[in-house]
Image: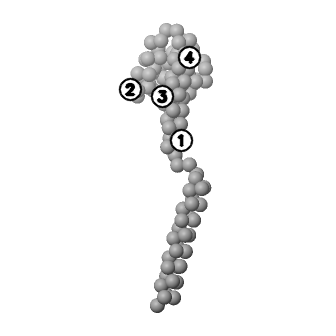
């Protein structure tokens, strides 16, 4: 099985071994291991539904294709969101900072010049 399938199956539970899940799907477990795994799956409705859905797929190649398509769509959507966030981010605008600093400097200098001229005129 591909590594992508292992990645998706790892989100089912931290208590269940990924390799054990894959072996279960391929009917490579002993009866005791199957019983133990099914007991663990019964405790969580989400995990149980996910395993039933995976078992319903007859062709194991179809599982790999489905996983690859899900990963592709997920990467595509997250890439779009990431590009959108990057587009909205404020970029480092050094020239803007320099311009603001110069305007503030000119305002302060104008204040002192006006204040000096008023004091000299009195």
Toward the viewer: 66 or 56?
66
Direction front: furthest residue: 121
Which mark is nearer the camera, 3 or 4? 4
Q: Is residue 61 above or below residue 67?
A: above
The answer for how far apart the CA atoms under marks 4 and 1 are is 32 Å
Q: Secondary structure at mark 4?
A: helix
Mark positioned earlier in the residue sequence (4 or 1): 4
Q: Is residue 92 visible?
A: yes
Q: How many marks?
A: 4
The answer for how far apart the CA atoms under marks 2 and 4 are is 23 Å
Q: Which residue is mark 2?
A: 45
The answer for how far apart the CA atoms under marks 1 and 3 are is 31 Å
Q: Position of residue 88 (x, y in %)?
A: 49, 43
Q: Is residue 8 visible?
A: no
Q: Which residue is mark 4?
A: 64
Q: Which residue is mark 3?
A: 12
The answer for how far apart the CA atoms under marks 3 and 4 are is 17 Å
Displayed quadrant of residue 50: top left
Q: Is residue 87 above or below residue 76?
A: below
Q: Residue at x 48, y 28 (%)?
A: 12
Mark positioned earlier in the residue sequence (3 or 4): 3
Please tell me the numbered disc located at residue 20: none
Which mark is nearer the camera, 4 or 1? 1
């Amino acid at each position: 099985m591909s590594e992508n399938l292992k990645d998706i199956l790892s989100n089912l539970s931290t208590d269940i071994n990924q390799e054990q899940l894959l072996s279960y799907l391929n009917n490579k477990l002993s009866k005791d291991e199957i019983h133990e795994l099914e007991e663990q799956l019964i405790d969580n409705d989400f995990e149980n539904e996910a395993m039933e859905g995976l078992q319903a797929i007859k062709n194991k190649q179809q599982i790999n294709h489905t996983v690859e398509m899900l990963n592709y769509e997920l990467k595509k959507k997250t890439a779009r969101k990431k590009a959108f966030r990057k587009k909205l981010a404020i970029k480092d605008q050094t020239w803007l900072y320099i311009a603001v600093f110069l305007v503030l400097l000119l305002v302060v200098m104008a204040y002192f010049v006006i204040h000096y001229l008023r004091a000299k005129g009195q």
